[in-house]
Image: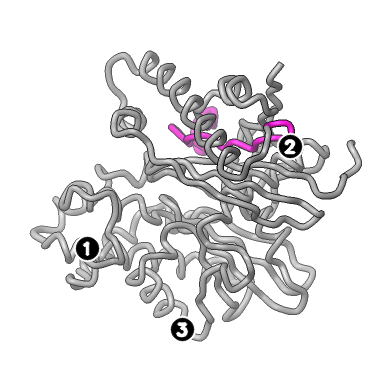
Amino acid sequence: MTPPTMAELYIGTLSGTSVDGIDVALVRFDPQPELVASHSAAFSAELRAEVLSLGVPGENEIDRLGRADVRLGEAFAQAVRELLEKVQLPPSAIRAIGSHGQTIRHRPGGTPAFTLQIGDPNVIAARTGIPVVADFRRKDMALGGQGAPLVPAFHEAVFRAHGTDRVVVNIGGIANLAVLPGGDGAVLGFDTGPGNTLLDGWCRRELGEPMDRDGRLAEQGQVNDELLEVMLADPYFRQPPPKSTGPEYFAMAWLQRHLAANGPCSPADVQATLVALTARSIAGALKQIHAVSRPDVFVCGGGAHNPALMRALAGELSGSTVAKTDALGISADWVEAMAFAWLARQRLHGAAGNCLGVTGAQRPAVLGGLWLPE
């Protein structure tokens, strides 16, 4: 194991399940992480459509997957180069890039279980001249774990506080939570279900917009209680942890089945009901764990910027303080990208990156492979 050195610089990068672009975070570890700079790069319309199409099996799927793998690698590398240009740093200043990539399939319940992320790390390393750590999920899955969510281990490292029970909720395309007890208890967590994936998908269909900006569509509607209860009856929500899921499960086809069975519902009412679904499933997950009572709840990810969703979550968690992770010193926008910089550092130092109370793996493990630019 390499002994830690001070003031190391790492980059974390990922594209979330919403496929709206690439987040890149430059992080200094001294030894605690500090966000130095950040950068977001939008996908071209062509690349975004290509990635989204991989969520639906079709003709020439392997060819389309191979092309998208390389193109995503190029896009990740370009986003890293843009960040380095912005901060005027040479590639040699960076110890490694932690690249989660883009999840195409996540089948923890399959026979056998598997997960697939693309965004070729060979391309990223070759184009940036920086070592790349990638393929974080599969070692955990090989050890009997879910392979996800991965960020709760980072939440434990930076947000856990003695004497104060906290819950960190990451609302990306899929929502997940990490319960951080203020005592000696183990960290618990899992994917709670849809976060923004259905909200964004419905807006793309009905408004031609990538998201419901400021929750405006949802605020025009009323929750359809019958539709909400039918959706909450999905077996995933009752499945005991450890568990994880993906947008290929909570897809638009899933929503369409429930809409067809429920009868007419206005677009705004559907959006309001989907907000309630995300909030109710997160709150229900906390009740399912029974680990802490009325903890402080801190939200990160894109959902933190949806006022309708934040209000709904606060309403479901009455008695708990609900705030963004900004209140703990890390912007809600950059927690996840910073987590992959941290995971890259864990890999280079030979330290475990999984959280057994979250993924259910048999043992702690060093996650990710290492791709060198030479």
* Mark drawn on residue 227: 1
Q: Could you say where residue 2 lies in the image, as x and y percent from the top left?
A: 89, 37
Q: In which quarter of the image is residue 11?
A: top right
The vertical placement of 14 against 235, above or below, is above
To which residue does mark 3 refer?
Answer: 318
Residue 212 location (% of width, % of height): 27, 59
- Where 117 falls versus 62 (above or below)? below
Instruction: Give how far apart the Cα atoms at labels 1 and 2 are.
Output: 53 Å
x and y, in percent, of residue 167 in the image: 59, 69
Is residue 148 shown left or right of residue 342? left
Looking at the rendering, which quadrant does residue 259 occupy? bottom left
Magenta segment: 91-116
**Tag shown at residue 93:** 2
Disc 2, SS: helix
Q: Is residue 351 magenta?
A: no
Q: What residue type is labelled 1?
A: Leu
| Foreground disc of the pair 1, 2 | 2
